Image: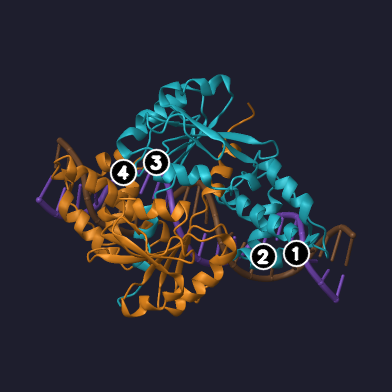
Chain colours: A cyan, B orange, C purple, D brown
Amino acid sequence: MRYHRIPDETIRRLPVYLRGLLSSAEQGHERISSKDLAEFLGVNPWQVRKDFSYFGGFGTRGVGYEVDNLARQIKKILRLDIVKRAALVGVGNLGSAVLAYSGFRMYGLEIAAAFDINPKRIGRKINDVRIEDASKLQTLKRRKIELAIIAVPRDDAQKTADSLVKAGVRGILNFSPCYISVPKKVKVITIDIAMDLARLPYYIPAG
Amino acid sequence: MRYHRIPDETIRRLPVYLRGLLSSAEQGHERISSKDLAEFLGVNPWQVRKDFSYFGGFGTRGVGYEVDNLARQIKKILRLDIVKRAALVGVGNLGSAVLAYSGFRMYGLEIAAAFDINPKRIGRKINDVRIEDASKLQTLKRRKIELAIIAVPRDDAQKTADSLVKAGVRGILNFSPCYISVPKKVKVITIDIAMDLARLPYYIPAG
DNA sequence: CTATGTGAATTTATTCACAGCA
DNA sequence: TGCTGTGAATAAATTCACATAG
């Protein structure tokens, strides 16, 4: 492998591969070929191999990939090899669902704190996480929590992000349907549920 | 404008533009320039103009875009000009949040039906939608509902998708963390919350 | 003989620079 | 003059084809 910039799309796919590998391990497989992995995930085998090749390749020619090892390598690349803790801000409908969601664990992610401004919610516990007053967001700094999930109403999203950045957060998963502006060193990924649904009708020819 | 295939990425951005335009209209603006729209959404002005140019261009040189008209045009392209009804399958934590979410309306989308297999949930109402027995999925055909949201546990996702396809559904928003296989005529968009969060640490250099 | 790894070819998407119209 | 619209240039990503290693 020669020096390459890693394509962003490759990074986007790594968690997909990881998911497939963890499933495969669950099913007791020790080895998997790019073909089988690709099929399971709905992508192309050569895409899989190309993606891995950016990191030097993890397989054995003629054989395939060793499932556990590959999963471990990907976790390392994604910096998921040590458990990462995240804070949730906004424990409404969506926030509560996120807090109750069990799918983070497989990636070594843990929702370790939750915040809200609603006094009725503060103090309650969901999934062993006590909901704290959102005015205490600065405590994230000394708690060394650098990831956050924003699930507040749209009009509060930007100032929530500002507080999070001030508290040292460096990665934000944003569920609010708006663009949020942050310093370059902070990475934001926005999920807009309605927008994704809104894109479906385009692909459905007149009916 | 010459004949072009519309890039998929352009389609992906159209709902983003629409969101910006609706916000702009809300704030009382009648016109907007590609520069202002782009800034508001966190994209480049030339990207905005290029995207619109695939459809022939909607603006007036030297002036900008007429907000209402542009929003209407985009809705038409996305086939959101007439209200589209969607069914939700799986009314657990995430499903309930989706059902309670108010953000669909702005795109002319409506969650018009909800299904679950849990007898405790069947019959309950959330947001005026009565939860029906998931064995009644076939009724979607005569109700002319062609969009669906899957929010069931991972291991039920594929067979839920199969039932939906059988019921005539042609667009699926899948919240289950797995690939689901469908006929080519059906479009699936998968949102995997954990996966998106899992991608953040990569962008955060050692700390 | 099998399945990986990777340069090269191709396709797709972004960015630029400026012509064209109000 | 100002901002759109768009070919052309550039960059990025995907696909291919096959050499290579086990």
Front: mark 2 or 1: 1
The correct choice, above or below, for C2 with respect to A98 in the image is below
Whole-number angstrom distance, CA of label 2 to CA of label 1 = 9 Å
The answer for which chain carries disc 2 is A
Measured as percent of width and height from the top left, residue C9 is found at 60, 65
Dot 4: within a 10 Å radius of its alpha carbon, few (fewer than 14), some, or many (20 or more) residues?
some
Front: mark 3 or 4: 3
The answer for which chain carries disc 1 is A
Circle 1 is placed at which residue position? Answer: A33
The answer for which chain carries disc 3 is A
Circle 4 is placed at which residue position? Answer: B45
Front: mark 4 or 2: 2
Q: Secondary structure at mark 1?
A: loop
Upstream in the sequence, badge 1 or badge 3?
1
Instruction: Give left or right: position of B87 versus B192.
Output: left
Figure quadrant of residue A24: bottom right
Circle 2 is placed at which residue position? Answer: A45
Circle 3 is placed at which residue position? Answer: A92
Q: Secondary structure at mark 3?
A: loop
Whole-number angstrom distance, CA of label 4 to CA of label 2 = 37 Å
Residue at 41% of width from left, 64% of height from top? Answer: B122
Measured as percent of width and height from the top left, residue B166 is found at 45, 79
Q: Secondary structure at mark 2?
A: helix
Disc 3 marks which amino acid?
Gly
Upstream in the sequence, badge 2 or badge 3?
2
Dot 2: within a 10 Å radius of its alpha carbon, few (fewer than 14), some, or many (20 or more) residues?
some
